[in-house]
Image: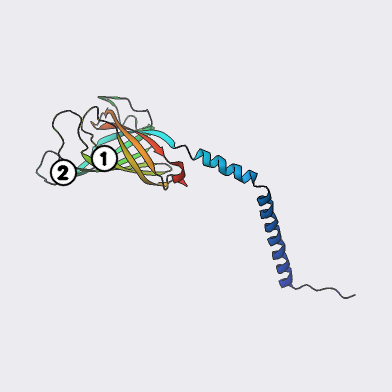
Amino acid sequence: MKKLLVSPFVSLLFMGLLGLSQLVLAQSSDAQNPSASSADRESQDFLDRFDLTFTLDNACDARTGRVNRVNPAATAAMRGDASIINGKLFNGWTLPEGFDRDFDLDGNAAGSIGVWRCVNMVLNDPAPGNTELPLTHTVTYYFELEDGMLILQGLNSHRAQGSVPRVHAIVGGTGRFKGASGEVREEVIGNNNTGAFNLRFTFRIRKQSLR
């Protein structure tokens, strides 16, 4: 009896057809019983209705501040002045409230969870006296955390005690926060031993934006 010889090409073709038939059967099975995948999607859609919320505290470091003045001879802020300052980020509700410079920035540096950077420009001359001010600065904030960075933009008036909280837009991010959008409430809660403000930021990020 003669043996049937099968070429390598025919063998590969047969294996390919077998794999394709298994894929079709699997898809057909999923189509007939979609309850599991549908339930997963509904669960995820329900969770996406809730914003991701968290709070970060920031201690601005006055020693890092630099100002580029429109008029180099001026001693007071003027429209168009630009400046930059850094700070240290902490978990929310870590920094004490009050303007007695009680928080030691260097002594508590070990508890920091990231770096904060602010680039701002003066919109108008600040009003005199220790009173609540109009919106005086346009700001861009960078929150550099271990698993990514968040970027904010908005307006503020950090010139007096009791400043009214401001709301900024989240305009993007990197790493874990890639594509992030939402809003952040910023509040001046006090100052630290460098003389600069302590700030509290409450984030509300749209979960769907993080996909």
User: In this image, 160 relative to 147: left or right?
Assistant: left
Q: Percent from the top left, x then y, of residue 61?
A: 27, 35
Placement of 163 over or under 209, stated as above or below: above
Residue at 51 percent of width and 38 percent of height: 47
Q: Percent from the top left, x then y, of residue 156?
A: 25, 37
Residue extending farthest to the front is 32
User: Where is mark 1, residue-wise?
Assistant: 155
Q: Between residue 35 and residue 178, name the one nearer to us.
A: 35
User: In this image, 84 relative to 182: left or right?
Assistant: left
Q: CA distance from mark 2 to mark 1?
A: 14 Å
Q: Percent from the top left, x then y, of residue 185?
A: 33, 34
Give amino acid for label 2.
Answer: Arg
Residue at 72 percent of width and 62 percent of height: 18
User: Where is mark 2, residue-wise?
Assistant: 79
Q: Percent from the top left, x then y, of residue 137?
A: 22, 40
> Mark 2 or mark 1, which has the lower sequence index?
2
Give amino acid for label 1.
Answer: Leu
Q: How is the image coloured?
A: rainbow
Residue 44, quarter of picture: top right
Residue extending farthest to the left is 73
Residue extending farthest to the right is 1
Q: Which structural element holds mark 1?
A: strand
User: In this image, 100 relative to 22: left or right?
Assistant: left
- Would you say residue 112 is visible in this rendering? no
Residue 150, quarter of picture: top left
Q: Between residue 142 and residue 152, name the one nearer to us.
A: 152
User: Are the residues at dot 2 and dot 1 in contact (C-beta closer than 8 Å)?
Assistant: no
Query: Which numbered tag is attached to residue 36?
Result: none
Instruction: Sort mark 1 into few (<14), some (14-19) or many (20+) by Cα contacts within 10 Å.
Output: many
Residue at 29 percent of width and 41 percent of height: 154
